[in-house]
Amino acid sequence: MPIGDLVRNLRKARGWSQGRLVSEINKAFGTGLTREYVSRWECSKVTPGACHLRHLSAVLDVPLATLEGRRTFLSDVAATAIAPVVASDLLSAGFAARLRGGPTAEHWEATLATYGTDYMSMGAADIQRRVAGELVVVQQQLDDPRLWSVAARLMTLYAKTFPGSDGSRAVSWYGTAARAADRSGDVRTRVWVRGRAAIALGYEGASLGVADILADQAMAISDKPSLGLVNAVMGKAHAAAVRGDRATAVRLADHGRRLFDRVGSHEQTSDYAVPWWRMNVFLSLLLARVGYEKKAAEAQEQARRELPASLPRFATHLEMHRGLMLARSGDRAGGTAYAEAALDRLPPAKHSLTLRMLMEEVRT
């Protein structure tokens, strides 16, 4: 990542404007830095010198080595995503885990189950910070192949916390997760990681080429029915729908539904599960995208019947699908207003990056 992009990302992670960054540096070090100079850094027109790198490291609370370009897994996690969490605390936790042997594989599986449930109701920023800390710890235990499977699934969840508009970062983490899954040697993990990434990107309408590639890889690894394969097929179906290839989208959706009938999960509130209501959420958006309004409405009704009351965010998804249907039918203003009202009714703490992308799709 160019250092200008890194400075911008770290600044935005703290919620600072360029002016605020300038103010913090000047206040701390008595320099005469200007906003225009920071803008030139972030546009990669000028590279910060050694002195300014030390200033940035101090006010942004990241290790100097990160800004100097040492691109290790640890510094990427600690610096580019979890600011302003103190990196030294995470480093300490990671090496302490290594020294005492770390949590057991069983402990990690229980931790994953907790994150799967929490993801369904928590905000992306909270999940991102917590998962980043777990990744710092688990990377100290990768002598055990089972922990590569844990790391791969954590990375997949971590990637989901980045907005699809920042496609390069989400896609990079999905790719890393896929490679980690391969290191585990576990076929189900290899398929699930790729399938989950494919449905995330396809549903969001982001990086469709990557969604196709990951879905194809999942299907090539194993054609045995599994939740990972359901996700892969539905992700590829959504990519086709966004491109306007209705026939392919419907054919793949039918295939995904047949797979689901064999492996659909009873667990209702986990990101690692695909229960009946969630399959209908997938179908609702896909059918809205291809213009099958009656079938989309039926899928929405089926989803509402079984959607747990504890997951209001997904009820908002369904309402926004209705907004998309209105917009696609020609009533763009009405569809936009309907979707905006649905999003406004959801408490801001429950908002997700995917909902924001859906809102943008309705508007455009």
Image (cartoon, rainbow, N blue to C red):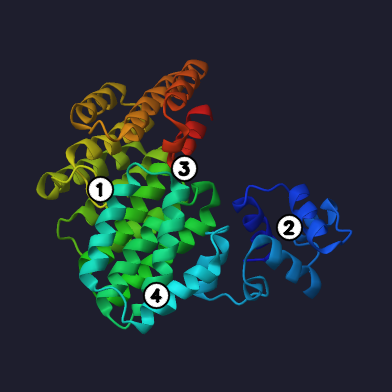
Check disc 4 and give the amino acid type. Gln
* Left or right: residue 356 compared with residue 118: right
* Residue drawn at point x = 32 percent, y = 62 percent: 153
Find residue 108 and report its horizontal and vertical position in percent.
27, 67
The tag earlier along the polypeptide, 1 or 4, is 4
Give the label on residue 42, or none: 2
Report the Cα–Cα distance between label 2 and label 3: 24 Å
- Local secondary structure at mark 4: helix
The residue nearer to you, when weighing 48 against 258, is: 48
251 versus 219 height, above or below: above
Image quarter of the C terminus: top right
- Local secondary structure at mark 2: helix
Report the Cα–Cα distance between label 4 and label 2: 31 Å
* Residue density around tag 3, few if under 14, some if 14–19, many if 20 or more, within 10 Å: some
The tag earlier along the polypeptide, 1 or 3, is 1
* Residue density around tag 2, few if under 14, some if 14–19, many if 20 or more, within 10 Å: many
Give the label on residue 139, or none: 4
- Local secondary structure at mark 3: helix
The tag earlier along the polypeptide, 2 or 3, is 2
Check disc 3 and give the amino acid type. Leu
Check disc 1 and give the amino acid type. Ser
Report the Cα–Cα distance between label 1 and label 3: 18 Å
* Residue drawn at point x = 48 percent, y = 69 percent: 90
> Label 4 near label 3: C-beta < 8 Å?
no
Where is residue 281, by image quadrant?
top left
